[in-house]
Amino acid sequence: MSLLVVGLSHRSAPVSVLERAALHADAQVKLVQDTVAADPATEAAVLATCNRIELYADVDKFHAGVAELSTLLAQHSGVGLDELTPYLYVHYEDRAVHHLFSVACGLDSMVVGEGQILGQIKDSLARAQELHTAGRLLNDLFQQALRVGKRAHSETGIDRAGQSLVTFGLEQLALGAEVSDWARGKKALVIGAGSMSSLAAATLARVGVREIVVANRTADRAERLAQILNDGGDVSARAVPMDAVSDELTRADVVVSCTGATGLVLTAEAVAAAVQDAGAGRGWVAQLGADEVPPFRGSGAAPARPTASSATDENCPLDLAPMPATAGFSVLGEAAVAGMAASELEQHAAWVDNAPRPQSSGPAVTVLDPAEEADAIAALAATAAVIGRVPERRRPEPVAEIPRPTPSLFLLDLAMPRDIDAAVHRLGGVRLVDIESLAEASADAPMAADVDQVRRIVADEVAAFGAALRAAHITPTVVALRSMAAEVVAGEIARLDGRLPGLDDKQRGEITQTVRRVVDKLLHAPTVRVKQLAAEPGGAGYADALRTLFDLDPETVAAVSRAEDSTTDEKDRGSS
């Protein structure tokens, strides 16, 4: 049997695919159960975090195992196999061990060196043990991964290379300021009460927020987390039901969300409404004016620009905003009409021809001669007629943008799939950091020298684990050989009793001990040597050779292996 892992992560797949492939708790349980029910696999465990989904299995056929595990991942994630396959990675035997050990050390995390992954690996193992899908191989593998991860954090400075996802996310919200300075005195809303949300709440309390409100679908979990926060420091914490989130959003300065919801928890409309309802309590309201709705960036219409002739564009058939310092629509702003169909342009040209010209005593306004404007529009229309649409300029005229107000509502979305609508990125006065933006921010993070040291630790541990695994593979054969030898000794002593019935107990004991010592000495060197050879790469064949040389019953060897697995399972369940 051999270790196989099939999965996808932030390194292999875009966030949009990870988001769709995310597995809720029930789906993870069903995936593991269906994996061990499939032909190639006898053990299975799933490691699912906010930025990875990995299925580990002990399989007897590589190609069949890859096909089956890939198919099961696609079925349970709801993403079609054809779409999912380009983003999947496969690791086998030593490479699979190396991958999990690297993950446990934080080398494969979005934020290098973060330690939260150790808790997630522990949870994954506990789930597999509870479902009885983790046998000797996966129990040994995951427990060793936990030890390797702890060793990396205790023996190196890998913690300096990165932080938890929560800390890194808060740093991104703080926009370069010290997190403690940025957070001091703020009110925070934490949506969810799971492990990630609890870590976020504890981190917020540590960096100095004044108040934390915890919202969760299960009220007692929210209340328990709030009580822990109240008992642990100066922060004031309270729990609210999920239907109170809209109201709490209007009072919050910082929102952290990480739930297991399959749909959005906060829509862009809900955030915009909450910010607007907060009124003068938001810094951006004073900058934009109390009656102005927070603008969306990238929406269909260009933002309105103050001009002396804004009234002339009220009836524009294409609903185009007025251009700066221009009486009506002007083709001098070609960037505004790039991509417009020829028929639309001609419709707008007709409106321009009939548009009233401003009469103003205010500042001078540039007004194009109607004939010149008509010629320019005709030229653009002729070009559009050839290619179907108005081409963009190679260097479009710079367009002055409305300055975005300083953020006054900060949102951190750590869920996968996302809890907060990505359209919130376009809201003025709001800053959203989510998994996708965290991935972009961490892509260029410098690698600390300690990372190289952790990689050496991982390499050494992988070699040691592989040797132990290969040695363990031959152990049942060695045990079966010694059992057979013991049976031979017992049979010969019985025959001796029949031939020499006059032997007393002392004499019989001395003879028995002598025969056993002879057998043990004859077997000692070969069995020690075969274990050493089996621990080396390519040593798996020595077990077969031993069984052939001594004509060992395969069922006897298998029985020894099953007995060892049963003992290991009981020990692991007792320690978990």
Image (cartoon, rainbow, N blue to C red):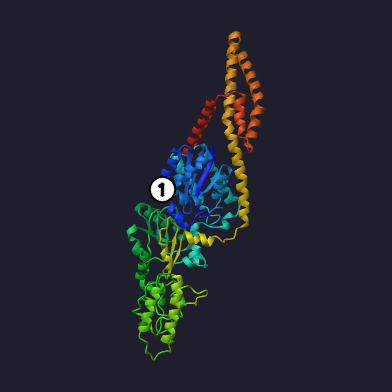
Identify the secondary structure beneath mark 1: helix
Q: Quadrant of the N terminus?
A: top right
Q: How far from the left and from the top, in percent, is residue 280?
A: 37, 74
- Is residue 238 visible to us here? yes
Instruction: Give the residue pinned by disc 1.
Output: 25
- Closer to the camera, 311 or 533? 311
Q: How far from the left and from the top, in percent, is residue 303?
A: 41, 75
What residue is at 35 percent from the left and 54 percent from the top?
Answer: 217
What residue is at 51 percent from the left and 56 percent from the top?
Answer: 164
- Closer to the camera, 503 or 334? 334
Q: Using the image, determine if residue 287 lies above or below residue 146.
A: below
Q: Using the image, determine if residue 404 lies above or below residue 443.
A: below
What residue is at 41 percent from the left and 48 percent from the top?
Answer: 25
Q: How far from the left and from the top, in percent, is residue 336?
A: 44, 75
Where residue 357 sits, quadrant-wise, is bottom left
Q: Using the image, determine if residue 48 lies above or below residue 131.
A: below
- Closer to the camera, 307 or 131? 307
